[in-house]
Image (spheres, rainbow, N blue to C red):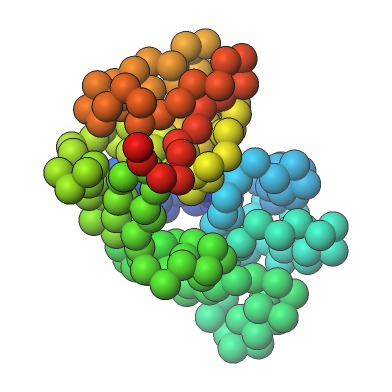
Amino acid sequence: MHILLVEDDNQLGEAIRHALVQQSYAVTWLRDGKEAARALRDPTADLVLLDLGLPGMDGMDVLLEARRDGVKTPILVMTARDALETRIRGLDIGADDYLVKPFHVGELVARIRSLTRRVRGLAENLIEAGGMKLNLATAEVEFRGDQVSLTRREFALLQALMEHAGHIVRREALENSVYGLDTVVERNAIEVQVHWLRRKLCPEAIRTVRGIGYMIPRESK
Ligand code: CA
């Protein structure tokens, strides 16, 4: 899952980025409001963490513009402005959730999970497909009843495929989910990750759709 982080405070931004990467999220980090507005118009992120006090353009205006343009990406606002009015206005113009600074990054991660679930209409942190069970809260993976230990990137890749089980996921979309936009990705990076995943699961767990991408079937054979 790819998260767009918009935060101009270097220390806080780094702490958040670090915590998210630990949780297998791909992170793109922007520090400027105008850049954030531009990035939101071309939504490659699954979720946006938006600070309000930003150089270039105020976060509230970034939010307003994105919603006016019909951007549907879930947005969680992080702000030191804890005035009730600010919060109400933010929610009114389309923020999906709010976190008042200072907050614990653990709480932020929990909010991200709950927001993601809400958006996808999931009741719990569990995704099941193709004989696999993926627990987003504990990062545990089960294949045909056995626990499988995955690296962060393998987990992110499997999650991206399982969220679209039964559909082809394009290689570029997978790169985006696993690496975000901040990382330069080698041409065969996803192929290599798929190779290792198949070794840990089984060769037919992930199907190759030549020239396009990969797919996990809904049901396992
Ligand atoms: Ca700020």
View extreme (front): residue? 221
Determine if residue 138 is in view. Answer: yes
On the image, the x and y values in percent for residue 204 come to 36, 26
Residue at 15% from the left image edge and 44% from the top image edge: 146
On the image, the x and y values in percent for residue 69 come to 84, 57
Q: Camera-side residue: 32 or 19? A: 19
View extreme (top): residue? 187
The image quadrant that residue 28 belongs to is top right
Residue at 24% from the left image edge and 56% from the top image edge: 138
Left or right placement of residue 157 versus residue 85 in this view: left
The image quadrant that residue 21 belongs to is top left
Q: Camera-side residue: 38 or 136? A: 136
On the image, the x and y values in percent for residue 178 come to 45, 33
On the image, the x and y values in percent for residue 4 come to 56, 47
Left or right placement of residue 106 versus residue 47 in this view: left
Q: Camera-side residue: 203 or 152? A: 203
View extreme (bottom): residue? 84
Left or right placement of residue 84 versus residue 114 in this view: right
On screen, 184 above or below 21?
above
On screen, 72 above or below 88?
above
View extreme (right): residue? 69
Residue at 49% from the left image edge and 44% from the top image edge: 165
